[in-house]
C-alpha cells in the first residue's frame, strides 16, 4: 500500500493512514493469502481456458461487472474472499453441489443437454413400464381418523398392505421400487359423477392402484416433521412412509 503519495504527507516520510484505510489494506492482504494467487474470472468471460487449475478449483466463483465476488451456483454475492471461503464450506453450497452432481458425471464433464437427457429418461420409464405387467392384486387398505394433539386438526391415516410382494414373482430390482401417493382431483378423471370429488391415489407397480376419497372442500396440511429422504415430491416426503420389511405403506395428513 502506498503510504507516501497522499495528502498531508511529507516528502520522504510516511503518509497519514486512517483506521479504515489500514483495515482495507489488511483485508486485501488476507484475501490474497486465502486466494493463493487464484485469478477469479468475470461472469462475461465464458472462455477461460480449461487447462487452468483455477477452473477446476472453484468453478462457480466469478466476479461481476462491479468487481464483487458471486457464486453462480447459489446466486449469492460476497464482498471479500473470506466470505467466499465461508460460503464454500457452508451447508447451502454443499447441498447445491450435490444437486448439481446429478447433471455431471464422475469425470467432471457435463453430460448431454437437458432435453436429450429428459428424452432418454422418459424412454427408460416407458421401457420399464412395458416390462411391468399388472398382477391384478389390489392392496388391502385400512383407514383411521387421527387428530393432531398440538393444533387440534383432524386427519386420516391410510395403511396399504403390499406384503403380497413376498409371494409374487418380483425381480430384485423391482423390489427396490417405492410406492408413492398423489392427490387427484375429480376433474382429472373421465367419469362425470366424480368431478366434484377428491381422492388420494396410492400407486405401486405392478399392483392395482388404490384410491381413498377425501373431503374436497378441505385444505391438506402436511406434517411438521421433515424427512431427509429421496421422494417424488414434498407430499410424499412429508406425508408417506414405506416399511420395506413388512411391505406396509403409510399415508398421513391433516385437514385445515
Image: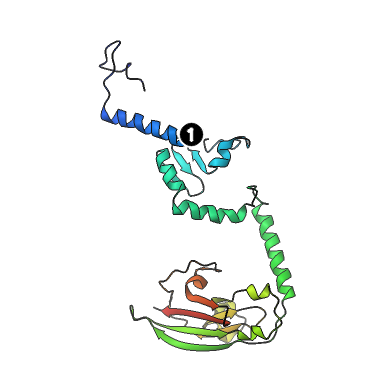
Q: Residues within 10 Å of mark 1 (few under 14, many from 20)?
A: few
- Residue found 72% across the figure and 65% down from its top: 123
Q: Is residue 127 left or right of residue 139?
A: right
Residue 90 x %, y %:
44, 51
**x%, y% of residue 210?**
59, 84
* Residue 153 locus on image (x, y percent): 37, 81
Number of labelled discs?
1
Decide which of 133, 189 is in the foreground and name it: 133
Q: Nearer the viewer, residue 146 or 84?
A: 84
Q: Which residue is mark 1?
A: 36
Q: Is residue 3 above or below residue 92?
A: above
Residue 206 lies in quadrant: bottom right
Answer left or right for 176 relative to 4.
Answer: right
Q: Position of residue 46 (x, y in %)?
A: 59, 38
Q: Secondary structure at mark 1?
A: loop
Is 184 drawn above or below residue 49 in the view shown? below
Q: Is residue 84 above or below residue 18?
A: below
- Tell me which residue sits at (48%, 34%) in the image: 36
Amino acid at each position: 500500500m502506498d503510504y507516501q503519495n497522499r495528502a498531508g504527507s511529507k516528502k520522504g516520510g510516511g503518509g497519514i493512514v486512517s483506521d479504515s484505510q489500514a483495515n482495507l489494506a489488511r483485508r486485501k492482504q488476507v484475501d490474497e493469502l486465502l486466494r493463493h494467487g487464484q485469478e477469479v474470472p468475470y461472469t462475461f468471460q465464458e472462455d477461460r481456458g480449461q487447462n487452468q487449475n483455477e477452473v477446476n478449483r472453484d468453478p462457480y466463483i466469478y466476479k461481476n461487472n462491479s468487481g464483487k465476488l458471486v457464486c453462480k451456483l447459489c446466486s449469492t454475492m460476497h464482498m471479500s474472499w473470506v466470505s467466499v471461503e465461508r460460503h464454500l464450506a457452508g451447508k447451502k453450497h454443499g447441498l447445491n453441489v450435490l444437486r448439481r452432481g446429478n447433471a455431471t458425471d464422475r469425470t467432471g464433464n457435463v453430460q448431454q443437454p437437458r432435453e436429450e437427457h429428459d428424452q432418454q429418461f422418459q424412454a427408460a420409464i416407458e421401457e420399464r413400464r412395458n416390462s411391468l405387467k399388472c398382477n391384478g392384486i389390489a392392496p388391502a387398505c385400512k383407514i383411521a381418523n387421527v387428530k393432531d394433539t398440538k393444533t387440534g386438526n383432524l386427519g386420516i391415516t391410510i395403511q396399504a398392505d403390499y406384503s403380497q410382494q413376498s409371494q409374487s414373482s418380483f425381480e430384485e430390482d423391482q423390489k427396490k421400487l417405492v410406492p408413492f401417493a398423489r392427490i387427484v382431483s375429480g376433474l382429472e378423471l373421465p367419469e362425470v359423477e366424480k368431478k366434484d370429488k377428491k381422492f388420494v391415489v396410492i400407486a405401486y407397480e405392478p399392483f392395482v392402484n388404490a384410491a381413498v376419497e377425501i373431503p374436497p372442500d378441505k385444505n391438506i396440511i402436511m406434517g411438521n416433521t421433515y424427512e431427509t429422504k429421496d421422494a417424488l415430491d414434498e407430499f410424499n416426503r412429508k406425508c408417506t412412509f414405506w416399511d420395506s420389511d413388512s411391505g406396509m405403506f403409510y399415508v398421513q395428513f391433516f385437514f385445515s
